[in-house]
Image (cartoon, grey):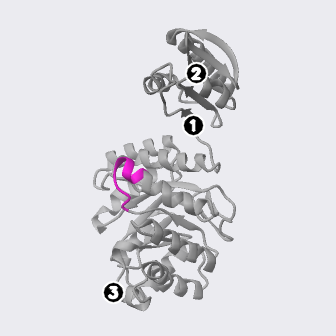
């Protein structure tokens, strides 16, 4: 159940059955152009499909134009407080902008922004945020924060729709998982526009990953969401990796190798954690996206319970075994098994190259 409508940002389709797109946001300020370009290159390599850039000051317009001219990834300008910044970003060539109804003017100024977007074929994302809900939004919904998020989106969505503009993406985010899930469920039931999902201010490290995975999986498993961002305190490429990891776990999209391993228990014959680390070092950069590799601690977990893995290593009473879809093809020391595993991976990578 993706959105009924679609939009195109650059040459990338969002919504209407397209894959759930993976987004991130530059952590580098626009004043550091070289840093922005370096981060953009890293995000492209990681598979990011849309990058949001904060555009907070008019004097950064030349920097924005330069970054746009060098980026192979579609750019969305993130605008707050001033509709003139949004218009300037559109005139500079961005294919999409994000406005926050919690701090963006409505009325005539919104209509001026709409006119510029129409003239340039720019997609507008209306993104409400739990941290910037106004007292008016909250009071109008009796303090119900999820409904207030929806109301904030509608405040700027409906005037655009009334004037025949539908190059729109909508979004309602909060740092609360239940609040975000309910708001997006309501939006998906009411409107056909592509929906951007995420848990804002999710946090750092494992805390941010867990909160993001919990909320996004709840939505994606119901078919809600056409584009997503994992908002982590940390490098932007980590956001992209986690987003693809969530989609892979749900069977939606596959990028890179799925490395599975047992948790370890009293039966283990090997140090599973250190073996996983050794296997990771062998993995090539280019390999099939649907490849599964298993590391199992004993003969119970592997090859038997990991029989579906394309390749696997398991500990035994006498050392290690290497197996392919449950069939043992080699036994020996960790060094011998690593050598055979590397041969298998190189063959797979070679087959892809040719």
Going from N to C along the chain, the mark reached first, 2 or 1, is 1
> Is residue 98 in sight in this rendering?
yes
Q: Position of residue 166 (x, y in %)?
A: 60, 77
> Height in image: 308 above or below 123?
above
Q: Position of residue 152 (x, y in %)?
A: 45, 82
> Height in image: 51 above or below 286?
below
Residue name at image x 54 percent, y 75 percent: 119
Q: Quadrant of residue 322?
A: top right
What span is in magenta?
201-209
Picture quarter with the N terminus: bottom right
Q: Secondary structure at mark 3?
A: helix
Q: Quadrant of residue 217?
A: bottom right
Judge by depth and name the residue closer to the eye, 109 or 269.
269
Cα gap from disc 2 to disc 1, whole angstroms:
19 Å
Q: Secondary structure at mark 2?
A: strand
Judge by depth and name the residue closer to the eye, 64 or 345.
345
Q: Position of residue 352 (x, y in %)?
A: 67, 28
Q: Which residue is mark 3?
A: 135
Picture quarter with the C terminus: top right
Q: Which residue is mark 2?
A: 313
Going from N to C along the chain, the mark reached first, 3 or 2, is 3
Would residue 189 appear left or right of 267 to someone viewing this image?
Answer: right
Give the residue at the far front of this rendering.
Answer: 266
Would residue 304 appear left or right of 143 to someone viewing this image?
Answer: right
Q: Which residue is mark 1?
A: 256
Mark 2 or 1, which is nearer the eye? Answer: 2
Residue name at image x 60 percent, y 65 percent: 224
Is residue 206 magenta-colored?
yes
């Amino acid at each position: 159940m993706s959105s009924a409508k679609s939009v195109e940002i650059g040459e990338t389709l969002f919504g209407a059955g397209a894959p759930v797109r993976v987004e991130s946001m530059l952590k580098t300020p626009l004043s550091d152009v070289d840093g922005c370009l370096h981060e953009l290159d890293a995000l492209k390599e990681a598979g990011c499909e849309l990058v949001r850039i904060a555009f907070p000051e008019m004097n950064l317009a030349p920097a924005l134009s330069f970054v746009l001219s060098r980026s192979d990834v579609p750019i969305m300008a993130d605008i707050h407080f001033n509709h003139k910044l949004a218009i300037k970003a559109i005139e500079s060539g961005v294919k999409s902008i994000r406005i926050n109804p919690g701090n963006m003017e409505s009325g005539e100024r919104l209509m001026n922004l709409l006119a510029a977007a129409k003239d340039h074929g720019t997609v507008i994302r209306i993104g409400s945020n739990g941290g910037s809900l106004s007292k008016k939004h909250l009071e109008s919904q009796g303090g119900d924060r999820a409904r207030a998020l929806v109301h904030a989106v509608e405040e700027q969505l409906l005037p655009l729709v009334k004037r025949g503009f539908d190059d729109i993406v909508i979004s309602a985010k909060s740092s609360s998982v239940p609040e975000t899930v309910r708001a997006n469920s309501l939006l998906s039931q009411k409107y056909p526009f592509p929906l951007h999902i995420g848990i804002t201010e999710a946090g750092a490290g494992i805390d941010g990953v867990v909160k993001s995975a919990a909320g996004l999986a709840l939505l994606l498993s119901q078919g809600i969401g056409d584009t997503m961002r994992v908002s982590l305190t940390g490098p932007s490429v980590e956001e992209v990796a986690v987003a693809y990891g969530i989609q892979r776990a749900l069977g939606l999209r596959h990028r890179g190798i799925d490395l599975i391993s047992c948790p370890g228990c009293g039966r283990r014959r090997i140090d599973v954690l250190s073996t996983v680390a050794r296997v990771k070092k062998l993995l090539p950069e280019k390999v099939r996206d649907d490849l599964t590799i298993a590391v199992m601690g004993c003969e119970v977990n592997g090859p038997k319970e990991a029989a579906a893995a394309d390749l696997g290593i398991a500990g035994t009473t006498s050392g290690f075994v290497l197996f392919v879809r449950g069939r043992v093809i080699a036994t020996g020391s960790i060094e011998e098994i690593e050598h055979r595993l590397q041969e298998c991976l190189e063959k797979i990578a070679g087959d892809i190259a040719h």
